[in-house]
Protein backbone atom coordinates (compact mmCIF):
# COMPACT_ATOMS: atom_id res chain seq x y z
CA UNK A 1 0.00 0.00 0.00
CA UNK A 2 2.75 2.43 0.98
CA UNK A 3 6.39 1.86 0.34
CA UNK A 4 9.17 4.27 1.30
CA UNK A 5 12.70 3.52 0.13
CA UNK A 6 15.59 5.62 1.39
CA UNK A 7 13.41 8.69 1.54
CA UNK A 8 14.94 11.96 2.62
CA UNK A 9 13.14 15.25 3.12
CA UNK A 10 14.21 18.78 3.77
CA UNK A 11 12.41 22.12 3.86
CA UNK A 12 13.98 24.57 1.47
CA UNK A 13 17.73 24.73 1.90
CA UNK A 14 17.64 23.45 5.48
CA UNK A 15 19.02 20.19 6.73
CA UNK A 16 17.20 16.88 6.31
CA UNK A 17 14.34 16.40 8.74
CA UNK A 18 13.93 12.83 7.51
CA UNK A 19 16.85 10.66 6.43
CA UNK A 20 16.89 7.28 4.73
CA UNK A 21 13.36 6.42 5.78
CA UNK A 22 12.30 2.99 4.52
CA UNK A 23 9.20 0.97 5.37
CA UNK A 24 6.35 -0.86 3.77
CA UNK A 25 2.75 -0.84 5.03
CA UNK A 26 0.43 -3.54 3.78
CA UNK A 27 -3.32 -3.08 3.30
CA UNK A 28 -5.33 -3.39 6.50
CA UNK A 29 -2.37 -2.65 8.77
CA UNK A 30 -2.45 -0.50 11.92
CA UNK A 31 0.58 1.49 13.05
CA UNK A 32 1.46 4.14 15.51
CA UNK A 33 3.92 6.76 14.37
CA UNK A 34 5.83 7.77 17.45
CA UNK A 35 8.71 9.98 18.36
CA UNK A 36 9.46 12.98 20.46
CA UNK A 37 8.30 16.43 19.46
CA UNK A 38 10.28 17.57 16.42
CA UNK A 39 11.30 14.04 15.47
CA UNK A 40 9.66 14.41 12.06
CA UNK A 41 6.26 12.75 12.57
CA UNK A 42 4.29 15.51 10.90
CA UNK A 43 6.82 15.70 8.08
CA UNK A 44 6.50 11.99 7.44
CA UNK A 45 2.73 12.29 7.43
CA UNK A 46 2.97 15.19 4.97
CA UNK A 47 4.89 12.94 2.63
CA UNK A 48 2.31 10.20 3.07
CA UNK A 49 -0.65 12.39 2.25
CA UNK A 50 1.16 14.00 -0.67
CA UNK A 51 1.40 17.50 0.80
CA UNK A 52 5.14 17.51 0.26
CA UNK A 53 7.60 15.98 -2.15
CA UNK A 54 10.61 14.03 -0.89
CA UNK A 55 14.07 15.45 -1.48
CA UNK A 56 15.27 12.00 -2.41
CA UNK A 57 14.25 8.37 -2.37
CA UNK A 58 11.23 6.52 -3.67
CA UNK A 59 7.66 6.72 -2.43
CA UNK A 60 5.14 4.28 -3.82
CA UNK A 61 1.49 4.81 -2.96
CA UNK A 62 -1.18 2.26 -3.90
CA UNK A 63 1.32 0.77 -6.31
CA UNK A 64 2.16 4.06 -8.03
CA UNK A 65 5.51 5.78 -7.88
CA UNK A 66 4.50 9.32 -6.98
CA UNK A 67 7.57 10.79 -8.67
CA UNK A 68 6.33 9.58 -12.04
CA UNK A 69 2.60 9.92 -11.44
CA UNK A 70 1.17 12.78 -13.51
CA UNK A 71 0.05 15.68 -11.37
CA UNK A 72 -3.55 15.43 -12.54
CA UNK A 73 -3.71 11.87 -11.20
CA UNK A 74 -2.60 12.79 -7.68
CA UNK A 75 -6.10 13.93 -6.55
CA UNK A 76 -7.36 10.41 -7.23
CA UNK A 77 -4.66 9.08 -4.88
CA UNK A 78 -5.46 11.71 -2.24
CA UNK A 79 -9.11 10.66 -2.31
CA UNK A 80 -8.02 7.24 -1.11
CA UNK A 81 -6.39 8.84 1.94
CA UNK A 82 -8.25 10.28 4.89
CA UNK A 83 -6.32 12.73 7.03
CA UNK A 84 -7.05 13.92 10.56
CA UNK A 85 -4.96 17.03 11.04
CA UNK A 86 -3.52 17.93 14.39
CA UNK A 87 -5.23 21.32 14.24
CA UNK A 88 -8.37 19.82 12.64
CA UNK A 89 -8.34 22.24 9.69
CA UNK A 90 -12.10 22.52 9.55
CA UNK A 91 -13.28 25.33 7.26
CA UNK A 92 -14.77 28.05 9.43
CA UNK A 93 -17.35 29.22 6.90
CA UNK A 94 -18.86 25.76 6.51
CA UNK A 95 -21.17 23.91 8.88
CA UNK A 96 -20.18 20.64 10.53
CA UNK A 97 -22.25 18.78 7.95
CA UNK A 98 -20.59 20.66 5.05
CA UNK A 99 -17.12 20.12 6.48
CA UNK A 100 -17.67 16.41 6.84
CA UNK A 101 -19.20 16.16 3.36
CA UNK A 102 -16.36 18.13 1.75
CA UNK A 103 -14.34 15.16 0.40
CA UNK A 104 -17.47 13.91 -1.36
CA UNK A 105 -18.52 17.33 -2.58
CA UNK A 106 -15.19 18.02 -4.28
CA UNK A 107 -15.51 14.80 -6.26
CA UNK A 108 -18.75 16.04 -7.80
CA UNK A 109 -21.04 13.59 -6.02
CA UNK A 110 -24.60 14.91 -5.81
CA UNK A 111 -25.70 15.85 -2.32
CA UNK A 112 -28.73 13.59 -2.60
CA UNK A 113 -26.34 10.68 -3.02
CA UNK A 114 -24.26 11.37 0.07
CA UNK A 115 -26.50 13.20 2.50
CA UNK A 116 -27.82 10.11 4.30
CA UNK A 117 -24.33 8.64 4.66
CA UNK A 118 -22.96 11.88 6.07
CA UNK A 119 -25.82 12.18 8.53
CA UNK A 120 -25.34 8.57 9.62
CA UNK A 121 -21.64 9.19 10.16
CA UNK A 122 -22.33 12.39 12.11
CA UNK A 123 -24.70 10.50 14.35
CA UNK A 124 -22.10 7.77 14.77
CA UNK A 125 -19.50 10.25 16.03
CA UNK A 126 -22.07 11.96 18.24
CA UNK A 127 -22.50 15.13 16.19
CA UNK A 128 -26.00 14.44 14.93
CA UNK A 129 -27.32 17.45 16.81
CA UNK A 130 -24.50 19.73 15.68
CA UNK A 131 -24.85 19.41 11.92
CA UNK A 132 -25.52 23.09 11.29
CA UNK A 133 -22.99 24.40 13.80
CA UNK A 134 -19.95 26.27 12.54
CA UNK A 135 -16.54 25.11 13.82
CA UNK A 136 -16.03 28.10 16.09
CA UNK A 137 -19.04 27.02 18.14
CA UNK A 138 -17.79 23.45 18.58
CA UNK A 139 -15.80 22.22 21.56
CA UNK A 140 -12.33 20.76 21.06
CA UNK A 141 -13.70 17.22 21.23
CA UNK A 142 -16.48 18.01 18.78
CA UNK A 143 -14.01 19.50 16.32
CA UNK A 144 -11.87 16.43 16.71
CA UNK A 145 -14.78 14.15 15.90
CA UNK A 146 -15.84 16.31 12.97
CA UNK A 147 -12.29 16.14 11.61
CA UNK A 148 -12.28 12.37 12.00
CA UNK A 149 -15.68 12.08 10.33
CA UNK A 150 -14.38 14.13 7.39
CA UNK A 151 -11.35 11.89 7.15
CA UNK A 152 -13.38 8.69 6.96
CA UNK A 153 -16.51 9.81 5.10
CA UNK A 154 -15.19 8.75 1.70
CA UNK A 155 -14.22 5.32 3.08
CA UNK A 156 -10.50 5.80 2.48
CA UNK A 157 -8.07 2.94 2.02
CA UNK A 158 -5.61 4.71 4.30
CA UNK A 159 -6.29 6.86 7.34
CA UNK A 160 -3.57 9.14 8.65
CA UNK A 161 -4.11 10.91 11.95
CA UNK A 162 -1.74 13.48 13.42
CA UNK A 163 -2.00 13.57 17.22
CA UNK A 164 -5.72 12.83 17.10
CA UNK A 165 -5.95 12.56 20.88
CA UNK A 166 -3.86 15.59 21.64
CA UNK A 167 -6.75 17.96 22.30
CA UNK A 168 -9.14 15.74 24.17
CA UNK A 169 -9.24 14.21 27.64
CA UNK A 170 -7.84 10.68 28.11
CA UNK A 171 -11.27 9.05 28.13
CA UNK A 172 -12.23 10.73 24.83
CA UNK A 173 -8.79 9.82 23.48
CA UNK A 174 -9.42 6.15 24.13
CA UNK A 175 -12.87 6.35 22.55
CA UNK A 176 -11.37 7.89 19.42
CA UNK A 177 -8.70 5.21 19.33
CA UNK A 178 -11.39 2.54 19.46
CA UNK A 179 -13.05 4.29 16.55
CA UNK A 180 -9.82 3.99 14.54
CA UNK A 181 -9.51 0.35 15.49
CA UNK A 182 -13.07 -0.22 14.31
CA UNK A 183 -12.24 1.42 10.99
CA UNK A 184 -9.17 -0.76 10.73
CA UNK A 185 -11.33 -3.83 11.27
CA UNK A 186 -13.42 -2.68 8.33
CA UNK A 187 -10.29 -2.77 6.16
CA UNK A 188 -8.84 0.71 6.35
CA UNK A 189 -5.11 0.94 6.97
CA UNK A 190 -4.41 3.29 9.84
CA UNK A 191 -1.36 5.28 10.85
CA UNK A 192 -1.68 7.37 13.98
CA UNK A 193 1.03 9.84 14.88
CA UNK A 194 1.25 10.38 18.61
CA UNK A 195 3.70 11.12 21.35
CA UNK A 196 1.28 9.80 23.98
CA UNK A 197 2.80 6.46 24.94
CA UNK A 198 -0.05 5.66 27.32
CA UNK A 199 -2.33 5.46 24.30
CA UNK A 200 0.14 3.25 22.47
CA UNK A 201 0.29 0.84 25.40
CA UNK A 202 -3.45 0.18 25.14
CA UNK A 203 -3.28 -1.18 21.60
CA UNK A 204 -0.94 -3.92 20.38
CA UNK A 205 0.08 -2.21 17.21
CA UNK A 206 3.59 -1.86 15.84
CA UNK A 207 5.26 1.49 15.93
CA UNK A 208 7.02 3.48 13.28
CA UNK A 209 9.40 5.18 15.67
CA UNK A 210 11.18 8.32 14.53
CA UNK A 211 14.29 9.60 16.20
CA UNK A 212 16.43 12.38 14.79
CA UNK A 213 14.77 12.01 11.40
CA UNK A 214 15.46 8.28 11.17
CA UNK A 215 12.81 5.60 11.39
CA UNK A 216 12.72 2.11 12.78
CA UNK A 217 9.83 -0.29 13.08
CA UNK A 218 9.14 -1.44 16.64
CA UNK A 219 6.96 -4.53 17.27
CA UNK A 220 3.86 -4.15 19.44
CA UNK A 221 4.34 -4.31 23.23
CA UNK A 222 3.68 -7.74 24.74
CA UNK A 223 1.31 -6.53 27.48
CA UNK A 224 -1.58 -4.98 25.64
CA UNK A 225 -5.01 -4.25 27.08
CA UNK A 226 -6.99 -4.91 23.92
CA UNK A 227 -6.35 -6.64 20.68
CA UNK A 228 -6.27 -4.84 17.39
CA UNK A 229 -5.78 -6.54 14.07
CA UNK A 230 -2.27 -5.86 12.98
CA UNK A 231 -0.64 -6.93 9.82
CA UNK A 232 2.69 -5.39 9.25
CA UNK A 233 5.61 -5.73 7.01
CA UNK A 234 8.28 -3.23 7.76
CA UNK A 235 11.95 -2.63 7.80
CA UNK A 236 13.91 0.26 9.18
CA UNK B 1 -32.21 20.25 13.20
CA UNK B 2 -30.22 17.55 11.46
CA UNK B 3 -32.97 17.05 8.91
CA UNK B 4 -32.36 20.58 7.66
CA UNK B 5 -28.67 20.02 7.06
CA UNK B 6 -27.84 20.92 3.48
CA UNK B 7 -24.75 22.15 1.67
CA UNK B 8 -25.79 25.75 1.21
CA UNK B 9 -22.45 27.50 1.56
CA UNK B 10 -19.98 27.93 -1.28
CA UNK B 11 -16.79 25.97 -0.80
CA UNK B 12 -14.91 29.27 -0.74
CA UNK B 13 -15.89 31.99 1.73
CA UNK B 14 -18.18 34.59 0.18
CA UNK B 15 -15.77 37.42 0.77
CA UNK B 16 -12.90 35.83 -1.04
CA UNK B 17 -11.26 39.12 -1.84
CA UNK B 18 -11.64 42.76 -0.97
CA UNK B 19 -15.16 42.76 -2.44
CA UNK B 20 -16.27 46.39 -2.18
CA UNK B 21 -13.04 48.09 -3.36
CA UNK B 22 -12.65 45.55 -6.15
CA UNK B 23 -16.26 46.01 -7.22
CA UNK B 24 -15.73 49.78 -7.27
CA UNK B 25 -12.57 49.56 -9.37
CA UNK B 26 -14.13 47.15 -11.84
CA UNK B 27 -17.26 49.31 -12.07
CA UNK B 28 -15.08 52.32 -12.92
CA UNK B 29 -13.22 50.30 -15.53
CA UNK B 30 -16.49 49.22 -17.09
CA UNK B 31 -17.76 52.80 -16.96
CA UNK B 32 -14.72 54.03 -18.88
CA UNK B 33 -14.91 51.14 -21.32
CA UNK B 34 -18.60 51.78 -22.00
CA UNK B 35 -17.99 55.51 -22.56
CA UNK B 36 -15.05 54.79 -24.86
CA UNK B 37 -17.10 52.29 -26.84
CA UNK B 38 -20.07 54.66 -27.03
CA UNK B 39 -17.82 57.48 -28.25
CA UNK B 40 -16.27 55.27 -30.90
CA UNK B 41 -19.72 54.12 -32.10
CA UNK B 42 -21.17 57.64 -32.16
CA UNK B 43 -18.17 59.00 -34.03
CA UNK B 44 -18.44 56.23 -36.55
CA UNK B 45 -22.10 56.99 -37.17
CA UNK B 46 -21.42 60.74 -37.43
CA UNK B 47 -18.63 60.21 -39.93
CA UNK B 48 -20.76 57.90 -42.04
CA UNK B 49 -23.62 60.40 -42.04
CA UNK B 50 -21.33 63.29 -42.88
CA UNK B 51 -19.57 61.39 -45.66
CA UNK B 52 -22.90 60.33 -47.08
CA UNK B 53 -24.23 63.90 -47.08
CA UNK B 54 -21.08 65.30 -48.62
CA UNK B 55 -20.97 62.62 -51.29
CA UNK B 56 -24.35 63.75 -52.59
CA UNK B 57 -23.61 67.44 -52.77
CA UNK B 58 -21.08 69.93 -54.12
CA UNK B 59 -20.69 73.63 -53.57
CA UNK B 60 -19.79 76.21 -56.17
CA UNK B 61 -18.02 79.18 -54.72
CA UNK B 62 -18.08 82.46 -56.66
CA UNK B 63 -15.53 85.07 -55.65
CA UNK B 64 -16.00 88.67 -56.84
CA UNK B 65 -14.29 89.27 -60.19
CA UNK B 66 -13.70 92.44 -62.18
CA UNK B 67 -14.70 90.79 -65.47
CA UNK B 68 -18.31 90.03 -64.42
CA UNK B 69 -20.83 91.41 -62.01
CA UNK B 70 -21.83 89.17 -59.07
CA UNK B 71 -25.32 88.72 -60.44
CA UNK B 72 -23.99 87.76 -63.88
CA UNK B 73 -21.61 85.26 -62.28
CA UNK B 74 -24.39 83.65 -60.25
CA UNK B 75 -26.83 83.52 -63.18
CA UNK B 76 -24.12 82.12 -65.42
CA UNK B 77 -23.38 79.25 -63.05
CA UNK B 78 -27.07 78.47 -62.56
CA UNK B 79 -27.58 78.49 -66.30
CA UNK B 80 -24.73 76.05 -66.78
CA UNK B 81 -26.20 73.70 -64.23
CA UNK B 82 -29.83 73.91 -65.28
CA UNK B 83 -30.99 70.77 -67.02
CA UNK B 84 -27.53 69.25 -66.91
CA UNK B 85 -27.37 65.46 -66.57
CA UNK B 86 -26.42 64.31 -63.09
CA UNK B 87 -27.59 67.48 -61.36
CA UNK B 88 -30.74 67.13 -59.31
CA UNK B 89 -30.93 70.66 -57.99
CA UNK B 90 -28.89 73.89 -57.90
CA UNK B 91 -29.71 76.75 -55.57
CA UNK B 92 -27.95 80.00 -54.75
CA UNK B 93 -27.69 80.60 -51.02
CA UNK B 94 -29.25 83.84 -49.82
CA UNK B 95 -27.07 86.33 -47.95
CA UNK B 96 -28.88 85.45 -44.72
CA UNK B 97 -27.94 81.77 -45.13
CA UNK B 98 -24.32 82.66 -45.86
CA UNK B 99 -24.29 84.92 -42.80
CA UNK B 100 -25.62 82.00 -40.72
CA UNK B 101 -22.81 79.75 -41.99
CA UNK B 102 -20.25 82.40 -41.07
CA UNK B 103 -21.80 83.04 -37.68
CA UNK B 104 -19.38 80.75 -35.78
CA UNK B 105 -16.47 82.87 -37.02
CA UNK B 106 -17.96 86.38 -37.34
CA UNK B 107 -20.60 86.30 -34.64
CA UNK B 108 -24.29 87.17 -34.75
CA UNK B 109 -25.69 90.26 -36.40
CA UNK B 110 -22.67 91.11 -38.51
CA UNK B 111 -23.71 92.57 -41.88
CA UNK B 112 -22.03 91.15 -44.97
CA UNK B 113 -22.36 94.37 -46.95
CA UNK B 114 -18.95 95.66 -47.91
CA UNK B 115 -17.23 92.35 -47.11
CA UNK B 116 -15.71 90.35 -49.99
CA UNK B 117 -17.85 87.35 -49.14
CA UNK B 118 -18.14 84.82 -51.97
CA UNK B 119 -21.52 83.69 -53.27
CA UNK B 120 -22.37 80.03 -52.77
CA UNK B 121 -24.36 77.72 -55.02
CA UNK B 122 -25.55 74.57 -53.28
CA UNK B 123 -25.73 71.74 -55.82
CA UNK B 124 -27.47 68.45 -55.12
CA UNK B 125 -26.26 65.61 -57.29
CA UNK B 126 -28.37 62.90 -58.82
CA UNK B 127 -27.22 59.99 -56.60
CA UNK B 128 -28.23 57.47 -59.23
CA UNK B 129 -26.06 58.99 -61.94
CA UNK B 130 -23.99 61.89 -60.58
CA UNK B 131 -22.44 64.39 -62.95
CA UNK B 132 -18.78 64.21 -63.95
CA UNK B 133 -17.48 66.63 -61.35
CA UNK B 134 -14.02 67.18 -62.80
CA UNK B 135 -15.45 68.10 -66.22
CA UNK B 136 -18.07 70.30 -64.59
CA UNK B 137 -15.44 72.02 -62.47
CA UNK B 138 -13.26 72.78 -65.49
CA UNK B 139 -16.19 74.11 -67.48
CA UNK B 140 -17.35 76.38 -64.68
CA UNK B 141 -13.85 77.72 -64.03
CA UNK B 142 -13.41 78.40 -67.75
CA UNK B 143 -16.73 80.07 -68.43
CA UNK B 144 -17.42 81.90 -65.19
CA UNK B 145 -14.50 83.95 -63.83
CA UNK B 146 -14.03 83.57 -60.07
CA UNK B 147 -16.16 80.41 -59.86
CA UNK B 148 -14.75 77.18 -58.49
CA UNK B 149 -16.33 73.84 -57.73
CA UNK B 150 -15.69 72.27 -54.32
CA UNK B 151 -16.63 68.60 -54.13
CA UNK B 152 -15.69 68.49 -50.39
CA UNK B 153 -13.38 65.53 -51.05
CA UNK B 154 -10.51 67.12 -49.18
CA UNK B 155 -12.75 67.94 -46.22
CA UNK B 156 -14.27 64.52 -46.24
CA UNK B 157 -10.93 62.76 -46.30
CA UNK B 158 -9.60 64.87 -43.45
CA UNK B 159 -12.78 64.30 -41.49
CA UNK B 160 -12.60 60.54 -41.96
CA UNK B 161 -8.93 60.52 -40.94
CA UNK B 162 -9.70 62.57 -37.86
CA UNK B 163 -12.68 60.42 -36.99
CA UNK B 164 -10.65 57.26 -37.48
CA UNK B 165 -8.03 58.59 -35.10
CA UNK B 166 -10.65 59.38 -32.47
CA UNK B 167 -12.20 55.95 -32.89
CA UNK B 168 -8.72 54.46 -32.55
CA UNK B 169 -8.24 56.34 -29.30
CA UNK B 170 -11.58 54.98 -28.10
CA UNK B 171 -10.53 51.44 -28.95
CA UNK B 172 -7.15 52.00 -27.30
CA UNK B 173 -8.93 53.12 -24.14
CA UNK B 174 -10.99 49.93 -24.37
CA UNK B 175 -7.83 47.83 -24.72
CA UNK B 176 -6.08 49.59 -21.84
CA UNK B 177 -9.18 49.16 -19.70
CA UNK B 178 -9.26 45.44 -20.51
CA UNK B 179 -5.57 45.08 -19.66
CA UNK B 180 -6.03 47.00 -16.42
CA UNK B 181 -8.99 44.79 -15.55
CA UNK B 182 -6.91 41.68 -16.19
CA UNK B 183 -4.10 43.01 -14.00
CA UNK B 184 -6.55 43.89 -11.23
CA UNK B 185 -8.18 40.46 -11.36
CA UNK B 186 -4.79 38.72 -11.33
CA UNK B 187 -3.83 40.72 -8.24
CA UNK B 188 -7.20 40.14 -6.59
CA UNK B 189 -7.13 36.42 -7.37
CA UNK B 190 -3.67 36.04 -5.90
CA UNK B 191 -4.81 37.99 -2.85
CA UNK B 192 -7.86 35.76 -2.66
CA UNK B 193 -5.69 32.67 -2.86
CA UNK B 194 -3.39 34.00 -0.16
CA UNK B 195 -6.33 34.95 2.06
CA UNK B 196 -7.86 31.51 1.55
CA UNK B 197 -4.66 29.52 1.59
CA UNK B 198 -5.99 27.31 4.37
CA UNK B 199 -9.19 26.55 2.47
CA UNK B 200 -7.37 25.92 -0.78
CA UNK B 201 -4.89 23.61 0.93
CA UNK B 202 -7.65 21.61 2.61
CA UNK B 203 -9.52 21.29 -0.70
CA UNK B 204 -6.28 20.22 -2.34
CA UNK B 205 -5.59 17.60 0.32
CA UNK B 206 -9.09 16.10 0.35
CA UNK B 207 -8.64 15.36 -3.33
CA UNK B 208 -10.10 18.34 -5.17
CA UNK B 209 -8.87 18.66 -8.73
CA UNK B 210 -7.22 21.95 -9.64
CA UNK B 211 -10.11 22.60 -12.01
CA UNK B 212 -12.60 22.29 -9.16
CA UNK B 213 -10.72 24.82 -7.03
CA UNK B 214 -10.27 27.14 -10.01
CA UNK B 215 -13.97 26.89 -10.81
CA UNK B 216 -14.80 28.16 -7.31
CA UNK B 217 -12.65 31.25 -7.87
CA UNK B 218 -13.82 31.85 -11.42
CA UNK B 219 -17.45 31.72 -10.35
CA UNK B 220 -16.72 34.27 -7.63
CA UNK B 221 -15.06 36.64 -10.09
CA UNK B 222 -17.70 36.06 -12.77
CA UNK B 223 -20.44 37.19 -10.40
CA UNK B 224 -18.38 40.06 -9.03
CA UNK B 225 -17.44 41.30 -12.51
CA UNK B 226 -21.00 41.02 -13.78
CA UNK B 227 -22.29 43.08 -10.86
CA UNK B 228 -19.52 45.65 -11.10
CA UNK B 229 -19.67 46.07 -14.86
CA UNK B 230 -23.46 46.29 -14.82
CA UNK B 231 -23.06 49.16 -12.35
CA UNK B 232 -20.44 50.76 -14.59
CA UNK B 233 -22.59 50.37 -17.69
CA UNK B 234 -25.59 51.82 -15.87
CA UNK B 235 -23.55 54.86 -14.85
CA UNK B 236 -22.23 55.23 -18.41
CA UNK B 237 -25.75 55.09 -19.89
CA UNK B 238 -26.88 57.73 -17.39
CA UNK B 239 -23.91 59.89 -18.37
CA UNK B 240 -24.74 59.52 -22.07
CA UNK B 241 -28.37 60.40 -21.44
CA UNK B 242 -27.40 63.51 -19.49
CA UNK B 243 -24.86 64.54 -22.14
CA UNK B 244 -27.51 63.98 -24.82
CA UNK B 245 -30.01 66.14 -22.96
CA UNK B 246 -27.73 69.07 -22.19
CA UNK B 247 -25.69 69.14 -25.40
CA UNK B 248 -26.73 71.50 -28.21
CA UNK B 249 -27.82 69.82 -31.41
CA UNK B 250 -25.27 70.30 -34.15
CA UNK B 251 -27.61 71.12 -37.01
CA UNK B 252 -26.52 72.81 -40.20
CA UNK B 253 -23.38 71.52 -41.80
CA UNK B 254 -22.26 69.11 -39.04
CA UNK B 255 -24.28 65.99 -38.23
CA UNK B 256 -25.23 65.17 -34.63
CA UNK B 257 -22.88 62.88 -32.72
CA UNK B 258 -25.30 60.35 -31.24
CA UNK B 259 -25.83 56.64 -30.72
CA UNK B 260 -27.93 54.55 -33.06
CA UNK B 261 -30.98 52.73 -31.69
CA UNK B 262 -29.18 49.36 -31.59
CA UNK B 263 -26.00 50.68 -29.99
CA UNK B 264 -27.15 50.01 -26.40
CA UNK B 265 -27.17 46.32 -27.32
CA UNK B 266 -23.54 46.61 -28.40
CA UNK B 267 -22.76 48.33 -25.09
CA UNK B 268 -24.07 45.24 -23.34
CA UNK B 269 -20.91 43.59 -24.60
CA UNK B 270 -19.01 45.56 -21.93
CA UNK B 271 -20.34 43.69 -18.87
CA UNK B 272 -20.36 40.39 -20.73
CA UNK B 273 -16.75 40.85 -21.87
CA UNK B 274 -15.66 42.10 -18.44
CA UNK B 275 -17.21 39.06 -16.77
CA UNK B 276 -15.62 36.65 -19.24
CA UNK B 277 -12.22 38.35 -18.96
CA UNK B 278 -12.39 38.30 -15.15
CA UNK B 279 -13.52 34.69 -15.09
CA UNK B 280 -10.81 33.49 -17.47
CA UNK B 281 -8.13 35.53 -15.71
CA UNK B 282 -9.12 34.15 -12.32
CA UNK B 283 -9.12 30.60 -13.64
CA UNK B 284 -5.69 30.80 -15.25
CA UNK B 285 -4.22 32.60 -12.23
CA UNK B 286 -5.49 29.94 -9.83
CA UNK B 287 -4.34 27.10 -12.06
CA UNK B 288 -0.92 28.71 -12.32
CA UNK B 289 -0.61 28.98 -8.54
CA UNK B 290 -1.97 25.47 -7.92
CA UNK B 291 0.46 24.01 -10.43
CA UNK B 292 3.26 25.00 -8.06
CA UNK B 293 1.72 23.00 -5.20
CA UNK B 294 2.81 19.37 -4.66
Image (tube, rainbow, N blue to C red):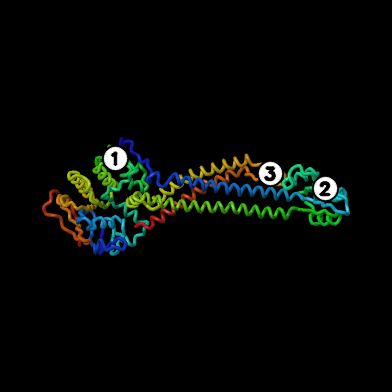
- SS class, disc 1: helix
Separation of residues labelled 2 and 1 (CA atoms): 95 Å
- SS class, disc 3: loop
Separation of residues labelled 2 and 3 (CA atoms): 30 Å
Q: Which residue is mark 3?
A: B250
- SS class, disc 2: loop
Q: Is residue A4 above or below residue B240?
A: below
Disc on the earlier residue, 2 or 3: 2
* Chain identity of mark 1: A
Q: Which residue is mark 2?
A: B114
Label 2 vs label 3, nearer the camera:
2
Crowding at label 3, few (<14), some or many (≥20) Cα neighbours within 10 Å?
Answer: few
Q: Which residue is mark 1?
A: A137
In this rendering, the count of numbered labels is: 3
Residue drawn at x 79%, y 43% as measured from the top left: B96
Residue A64: image location, x then y, percent: 31, 59
* Chain identity of mark 2: B
Crowding at label 1, few (<14), some or many (≥20) Cα neighbours within 10 Å?
Answer: few
Q: Nearer the viewer, residue A13 or A69?
A: A13
Q: Answer yes or no: is residue B91 visible.
A: no
Q: Quadrant of the N terminus of chain B?
A: top left
* Chain identity of mark 3: B
- A107 relative position to A203: left or right: right
Instruction: Tell if the residue under mark 2 belongs to the same chain as the one under mark 3.
Output: yes
- State if disc 3 and disc 2 touch (CB < 8 Å): no
Q: Quadrant of the C terminus of chain B?
A: bottom left
Amino acid sequence: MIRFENVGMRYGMGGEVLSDVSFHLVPGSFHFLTGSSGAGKSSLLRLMFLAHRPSRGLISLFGQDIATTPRDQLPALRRRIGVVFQDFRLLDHLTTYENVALPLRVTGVREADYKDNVMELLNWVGLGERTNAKPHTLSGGEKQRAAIARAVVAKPDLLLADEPTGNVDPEMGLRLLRLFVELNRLGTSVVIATHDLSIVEHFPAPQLRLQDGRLKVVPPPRRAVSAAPVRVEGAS
Amino acid sequence: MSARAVARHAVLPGRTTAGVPLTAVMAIMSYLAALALAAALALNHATEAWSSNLAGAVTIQIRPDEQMSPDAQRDGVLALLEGRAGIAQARALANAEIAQLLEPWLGKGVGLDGLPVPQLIDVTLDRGAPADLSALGEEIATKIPGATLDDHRSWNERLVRFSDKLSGIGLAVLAVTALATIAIVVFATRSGLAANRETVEVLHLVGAQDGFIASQFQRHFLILALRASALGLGAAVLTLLVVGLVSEKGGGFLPDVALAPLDPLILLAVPVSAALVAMATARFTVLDVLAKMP
